[in-house]
Amino acid sequence: MKLPHLQSLLFELKKIPSVGPRSAERMVQYFLKTKNSDLQQLSKLLTELKHKIKTCSQCFVFTQEEDLCSFCKDNSRKSEILCVVEQAFDVFRMESCGSFKGSYHVLHGVLSPLNNIHPENLTLQQLQKRVVEKEIKELILAFDSDLEGDTTALYIKEIFKNSNVKISRPALGIPLGSDLSFVDDKTLKQAIENRNYL
Ligand SMILES: [Zn+2]
């Protein structure tokens, strides 16, 4: 049975991280059942996504058609403390716990030689430049507590070893090997408040 359109759609859906053959089939079933207007809205949002959503030129969090994000524009936030995170969505996660009033820096990944992610693939150079130019006093490295997160933290510590920048990581309480997105707000708040200096 030749269903080239369906097969092409399944092929594209399976490229999405965490989507396997069964999930792709369930999505197609949902699309076929859903209202045309919802499908059109989804299609419109996807088509416009890369045009509308940019990254902030300073901290690399998401912005919508603006050069600087709302965090970088907000003068009430402490600009000399940066919370360094792996992905832009981690910033929203940090904000929901409500205990951090500094600024952010998104690396857009963590070091992972096995997956071909090297320092030049991240925003580390921009971080280094920002620390010098903006006289940053502290970096809180809020990565997941796993091998890649730890490797990235050590690399950043090495970059700034001859500077006065304080470097910390959220306190244990975030279990080893855990993903920040699964830690509850209270635990995350405590982990930031009781952070350990490296
Ligand atoms: Zn920003």
Image: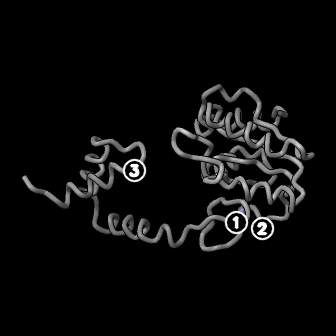
Q: Amino acid at mark 3?
A: Ile
In the rendered structure, the answer to whether residue 30 lies left or right of residue 73 reads left
**Position of residue 152 in the picture relative to residue 15 (left or right):** right
Q: Residue at x 84, y 50 (%)?
A: 81
Residue 159 appears in the rendering: yes
Mark 2 closeness class: few <14, some 14–19, many ≥20 residues within 10 Å = few
Task: Give the residue at mark 1.
Answer: 69
Above-or-below relation of 41 to 16: below
Q: CA distance from mark 3 to mark 1?
A: 27 Å
Ligand 1 in which quarter? bottom right
> Neighbour class for label 3 at 10 Å: few (<14), some, many (≥20)?
few
- Distance from the alpha carbon under mark 2 to that under mark 1: 6 Å
Identify which amino acid the numbered label 2 is placed on: Lys
Camera sees residue 88: no
Residue 26 at x, y percent in the picture: 28, 46
Residue 177 pos. (x, y %): 60, 28
